[in-house]
Amino acid sequence: MPIVGGDFEERALAAALDHVALNQAAASLYRDRFGSTPGIVYAAGVDHAYNLAQEFRAAGLQTMAVSGRTPPRELAETLAAYERGEINVLINAQLLAEGWNSPRATVCMHLAPTASKRVCVVTGSHLIVSFSFILSWLSMELATRLHRSMEKPAISLLSSMKEKGVASTR
């Protein structure tokens, strides 16, 4: 996996992670562990965010994706719907970050790993359950099984992460 400016190259990362099997696994994991608990999901790219939202909805979760492509009025309406509880999961790619805060956001699911030693810094008084799907759930065993259906990028990504010391194969 190429590293640019100290982190994984965005397009290569999105190409490695945006696969139906991984997106369905993330949606199932969220549904099974957190149910309708409100949360934010960080995707590896804009298309990845919209594809994840489709799988989260298919798993029965009230979900919307937002991105820099989202028209301002639609973005404002979506964020307001989230705050009203009409949407429980917001999926984005580097849009809802610094300067954005929601008292409802309880789960923070990172589906875009980083080569950086930092994963997430959260401040405030709200309980945030933060974990990295790719680091804690996608083991080398799973990557090997998925390899048969999706080429080598996931294994290459995990190998790069292991070399950088940000992943392990427990």
Image (cartoon, helix red, strand yellow):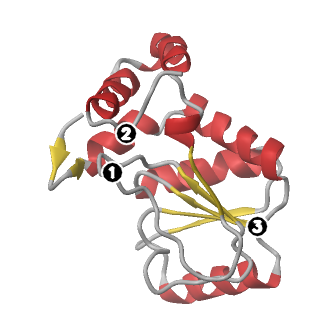
In the rendered view, tell whether residue 151 sits above or below residue 72. Answer: above
Quadrant in which the N terminus appears: top left
Residue 167: percent from the left, percent from the top? Answer: 41, 33
Residue for badge 3: 38
Residue lying furthest left in this view?
5
Point out the tag, 1 or 2, that comes first from the N-terminus.
1
Q: Image point 44% across, 62% down: which residue?
A: 93
The amino acid type of the residue labelled 3 equals Pro
Q: In which quarter of the image is residue 53?
A: bottom right
Residue for badge 2: 166
Residue 85: percent from the left, percent from the top? Answer: 82, 77
Secondary structure of the residue carrying tag 2 is loop
Between disc 1 and disc 3, the foreground one is 1
Residue 151: percent from the left, percent from the top? Answer: 38, 18
Point out the tag, 3 or 2, that comes first from the N-terminus.
3
Near mark 3 (Cα within 10 A), the count class, few <14, some 14-19 or many ≥20, is many
In the rendered view, tell whether residue 148 sits above or below residue 39. Answer: above
Closer-to-camera residue (15/7): 7
What number is the disc on residue 117?
A: 1
Q: How far apart are marks 3 and 2 (CA)?
A: 27 Å
